[in-house]
């Protein structure tokens, strides 16, 4: 007998709360579509009351997807629930996810409510949310640091008023596996109406225990797990979806649970999220890191050749790592290109294909072999540039061991082009200085990394940067056969994200919901 476990993906909500991971609507839609293909059960698309931008993004995801349940987050208050209900209106299947804190620390210092007031707010919010949908989830924020008997009471009240899913998060990443599992078991044994709801968990990785805590909870009766792709999220991140799913699959001898996830889509989803957010995946990251399936030592390689299972507990194919990445060259036609796009999972309009094909031809002129990564970079660039405030239209640099590095460039903003020139310590510094002048945006470069996107001397350079301004930061990414151009694109990408984030942030402040955002 195996039990079905629901996968609740919050990459677009908690994941987006990672410092520097602001996403445009286009990015969210692209990720949401891939999540649906991956087969998660619920997608938490955002926090509609937070800002008009968040509202629109949730609404667009709700309009676009057809199969997956779309959830929106709301505090336990009417105006948040109203925003949620409105944003989710176009969804085929919708869920309102409402929350309040259950720990004394939060009630006293964050919500400034008594225990009794929080119980009343729970009842009222859940009942109100049920007017809009039967599918209501209630979360007791900071559950893992709450008094267990009080938590039981809150859970009972939420279920009594119509919550079908009750989530007990380890909001601050403080729990350890046995204790967290016991909390779930305690709820099952002490809440009289517990059978009427699905218990859910939501773990943060501050102590590196998010996945272990989630699995301990599942063993003790939780049947929904909240997680993100690549484990992105607030602070140290959330429980990583791919790690939970592959742990359950690989150790099916021990864990009798099934999920709806098509694991062959994991690798592609992981890369998409990494590319669009600019969050690089560490090489030794479990499941999706570049080295996750690399066997370096001679003894291991020999063992692998003799019998793969000597050292391999799961196969790269099971998560969809593509076998051969060499695809196209300069003589490949539109038909072959279109076919390859489809194989990679992109079903695009004829105009979009024409547009990409022209870019592909330009690229194939510059490098001999065009790999899947190159094609994906073209597509992602198109998605992430859709709403860019500034676009780079011209770039010229000169540098050498005896000349002063200089950069001249032009940027386009809303149909107006402006040009600037600057010098610097090197050509990259000169380019960044010129961009600062052209945009009037003086960011601090926190991090700069350059790597080859694929193998070979003609490989494209992939530059990722972190740029900070006034306590805010954003990651940018740029890809080109010219590393200076890649640097310019990455820096400008980060500047554009900061501009977008600034807009969202001031809107969020206007909505006065800075408190209690960190579920
Ligand atoms: Zn969280």
Image (tube, helix red, strand yellow):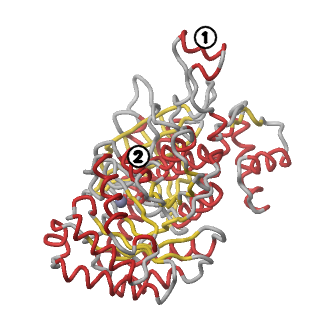
Q: Is residue 282 left or right of residue 100?
A: right
Residue 478: x %, y % from top left: 52, 45
**73, above or below 244, in the image:** below
Residue 53 in view here: no
Nearest the eye: 37 or 48: 37
Q: Is residue 11 left or right of residue 466?
A: right
**434, above or below 284, in the image:** below
Q: Is residue 361 left or right of residue 198?
A: right
- Residue at x 63%, y 32% (from the top left corner): 315
Q: Residues within 10 Å of mark 1 (few under 14, many from 20)?
A: some
Residue 388: x %, y % from top left: 51, 62
Which quarter of the image is occupied by the C terminus? bottom left
Q: Is mark 1 within 8 Å of ligand 1?
A: no
CA–CA distance in space, label 2 to label 1: 32 Å
Quarter of the image where one finds residue 90:
bottom right
Residue 208: x %, y % from top left: 33, 42
Residue 313 in view here: yes
Q: Residue at label 1?
A: 302
Q: Are marks 2 and 1 in contact (CB under 8 Å)?
A: no
Q: Residue at label 2?
A: 211
- Residue at x 44%, y 53% (from the top left corner): 218
- Residue at x 38%, y 66% (from the top left corner): 167
């Amino acid at each position: 007998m195996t039990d079905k476990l629901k996968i609740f993906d919050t990459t677009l909500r908690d994941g987006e709360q990672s410092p520097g991971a602001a996403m445009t609507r286009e990015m969210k839609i692209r990720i949401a579509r891939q999540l649906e293909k991956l087969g998660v059960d619920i997608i938490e698309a955002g926090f509609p009351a937070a800002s008009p931008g968040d509202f629109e993004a949730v609404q667009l995801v709700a309009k676009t997807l057809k199969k997956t349940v779309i959830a929106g987050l709301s505090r336990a208050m009417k105006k948040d629930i109203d925003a949620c209900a409105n944003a989710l209106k176009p969804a085929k299947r919708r869920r309102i996810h409402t929350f309040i804190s259950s720990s004394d620390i939060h009630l006293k210092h964050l919500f400034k409510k008594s225990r009794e007031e929080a119980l009343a707010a729970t009842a009222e919010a859940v009942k109100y949310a049920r007017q809009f949908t039967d599918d209501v989830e209630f979360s007791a924020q900071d559950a893992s640091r709450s008094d267990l008997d009080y938590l039981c009471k809150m859970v009972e009240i939420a279920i009594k008023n119509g919550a079908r899913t009750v989530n007990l998060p380890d909001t601050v990443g403080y729990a350890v596996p046995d204790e967290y599992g016991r909390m779930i078991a305690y709820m099952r044994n002490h809440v009289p109406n517990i059978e009427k709801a699905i218990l859910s968990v939501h773990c943060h990785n501050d102590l590196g225990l998010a996945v272990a805590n989630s699995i301990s909870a599942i063993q003790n009766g939780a049947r929904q797990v909240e997680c993100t792709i690549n484990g992105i999220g607030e602070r140290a991140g959330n429980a990583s979806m791919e790690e939970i799913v592959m742990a359950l699959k690989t150790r099916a001898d021990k864990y009798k649970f099934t999920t709806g996830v098509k694991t062959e889509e994991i690798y592609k989803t992981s890369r998409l999220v990494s590319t669009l957010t600019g969050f690089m995946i560490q090489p030794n990251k479990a499941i999706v890191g570049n080295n996750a399936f690399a066997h370096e030592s001679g003894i291991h390689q020999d063992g692998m050749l003799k019998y793969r299972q000597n050292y391999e507990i799961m196969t790269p194919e099971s998560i969809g790592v593509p076998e051969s990445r060499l695809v196209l060259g300069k003589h490949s036609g539109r038909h072959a290109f279109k076919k390859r796009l489809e194989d990679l999972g992109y079903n695009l309009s004829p105009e979009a294909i024409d547009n990409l094909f022209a870019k592909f031809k330009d690229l194939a002129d510059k490098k001999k072999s065009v790999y899947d990564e190159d094609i994906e970079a073209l597509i992602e660039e198109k998605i992430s540039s859709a709403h860019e405030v500034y676009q780079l239209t011209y770039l010229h640099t000169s540098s050498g061991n005896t000349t002063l590095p200089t950069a001249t460039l032009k940027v386009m903003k809303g149909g107006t082009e402006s040009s600037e020139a600057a010098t610097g310590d090197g050509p990259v510094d000169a380019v960044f200085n010129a961009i600062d002048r052209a945009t009037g945006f003086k960011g601090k470069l926190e991090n700069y990394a350059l790597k080859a996107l694929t193998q070979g001397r003609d490989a494209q350079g992939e530059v990722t940067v972190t740029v900070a301004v006034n306590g805010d930061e954003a990651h940018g990414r740029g890809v080109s056969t010219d590393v200076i151009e890649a640097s310019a694109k990455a820096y400008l990408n980060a500047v554009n994200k900061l501009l977008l984030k600034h807009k969202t942030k001031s809107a969020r402040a206007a909505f006065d919901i800075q408190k209690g955002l960190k579920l």
